[in-house]
Amino acid sequence: MIFGCNICGNKKNIYKVKFVSVNMKLVCRDAICCDEYMEQIITDEYKGIPEIKRNDSAMNNGDKLWNDFKHNNVEK
């Protein structure tokens, strides 16, 4: 992610970003310049939170485990 300073215009590229809450605002604790937190610059490579994609076989195995559990634990 690329961060920019609003005061001097300096830019910083940080690979591993750790966000913290400061005054009810999420900021990167490693992106500091001119004694202020830098703001993130949105680029084409950054598209927000990634989507989680699962393959069908993982979902089918989960259903089988759940169905086996329900079948074995139902009062008869």
Image (cartoon, grey):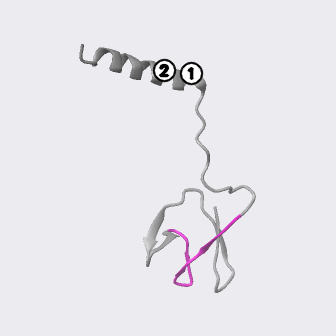
Residue 14, how many percent across, how many down? Answer: 60, 62
Residue located 54% across and 60% down the image: 17
Quarter of the image that includes the C terminus: top left
Residue 48 placement, left or right of 62: right
Q: Residue furthest left?
A: 75
Residue type at mark 1 is: Ser
Numbered badge on residue 61? 2
Numbered badge on residue 19? none
Q: Residue furthest front?
A: 76
Residue 42, how many percent across, how many down? Answer: 69, 65
Q: Nearer the viewer, residue 69 or 17?
A: 69
Residue located 37% across and 16% down the image: 68
State the SS at label 1.
helix
Density class for disc 1 (Cα within 10 Å; few <14, some 14-19, many ≥20) is few
Residue located 45% across and 67% down the image: 20
Quadrant in the picture for residue 44: bottom right
Residue type at mark 2 is: Asn
Asked if the residue at tag 2 contacts the one at tag 1, i.e. Cβ–Cβ closer than 8 Å, the answer is: yes
The relative height of residue 48 versus residue 29 in the rendered view (above or below) is: above
Density class for disc 2 (Cα within 10 Å; few <14, some 14-19, many ≥20) is few
Q: Which residues are magenta?
A: 30-42
Whether residue 17 appears in magenta in the rendering, the answer is no
Residue 56, how many percent across, how many down? Answer: 59, 24
Numbered badge on residue 57? 1
The relative height of residue 44 versus residue 27 in the rendered view (above or below) is: above
Whether residue 33 appears in magenta in the rendering, the answer is yes
Residue 5, how many percent across, how many down? Answer: 63, 79
Quarter of the image that includes the N terminus: bottom right
